[in-house]
Amino acid sequence: DTGVSQNPRHKITKRGQNVTFRCDPISEHNRLYWYRQTLGQGPEFLTYFQNEAQLEKSRLLSDRFSAERPKGSFSTLEIQRTEQGDSAMYLCASSPRDRQETQYFGPGTRLLVL
Amino acid sequence: QKEVEQNSGPLSVPEGAIASLNCTYSDRGSQSFFWYRQYSGKSPELIMFIYSNGDKEDGRFTAQLNKASQYVSLLIRDSQPSDSATYLCAVNNRYSTLTFGKGTMLLVSP
């Protein structure tokens, strides 16, 4: 399977703990995006990378959130000092060079903060 | 605030009928328009994209775009129970990221 992969698929944590999610994009896709989706809402953009450069961050991405894509391949999204409001599905997507607006999503990581 | 509006539904159609899903957007500078299907508990799956005014057909799906009216629609012909899902309309913004609507739930009854 050469689709976008995300790990873990589910994460339950206690408020105040740090969590880290990983995304592996489709091979040779140079752009990688992070979105957050809550129940009844569409995905909301958080940040995106072109190769290893982080080009855009949403105002939703508070200073407790950080994302990296160190070698332009996989990416990590870390949430520090989690809050109950961080409970959501975190989605990763990637897009190819020749059609950069066309984004393909991974299965998501569902986070529950207790 | 750039917005994408969709009727949340549910839109209920009988099996074999045509389902019509609609979307409006506020940013006149948007160039690319996408429809994603999302089953409950799953991630969005890209089913159609359209860049130019008019219709684009792919199997049972037809996307329609009217930039003057800032309106995008998705028609599903011969609807099947397996089409029951939430359909998300998405519009590109200036950084090639996507702004999504809240989605329309489609229910196809046998």
Image (cartoon, grey):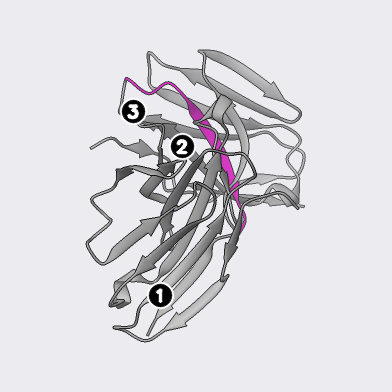
| Secondary structure state at the residue bearing disc 3 | loop
Kindly identify which residue carries mark 1: A19
Q: Is residue B32 magenta?
A: yes
- Residue B81: x and y in percent read 74, 51
Kindly identify which residue carries mark 2: B90
Q: Residue extending furthest front? A: A71
Rendering quarter of residue B2: top left
- Residue B92: x and y in percent read 41, 31
Residue at 47% x, 67% y is: A21
Vertical side of B110 occupied by B25: above or below: above
Instruction: State how far apart marks 2 and 1 are (Cα).
Output: 29 Å
Kindly identify which residue carries mark 3: B94
Q: Is residue A109 magenta?
A: no
The stretch in magenta equals B29-40
Can the viewer see residue A42 in this picture? no
| Secondary structure state at the residue bearing disc 1 | strand
- Residue B27: x and y in percent read 30, 26
Residue at 50% x, 53% y is: A92
Question: Mark 2 is on which residue type?
Answer: Ala
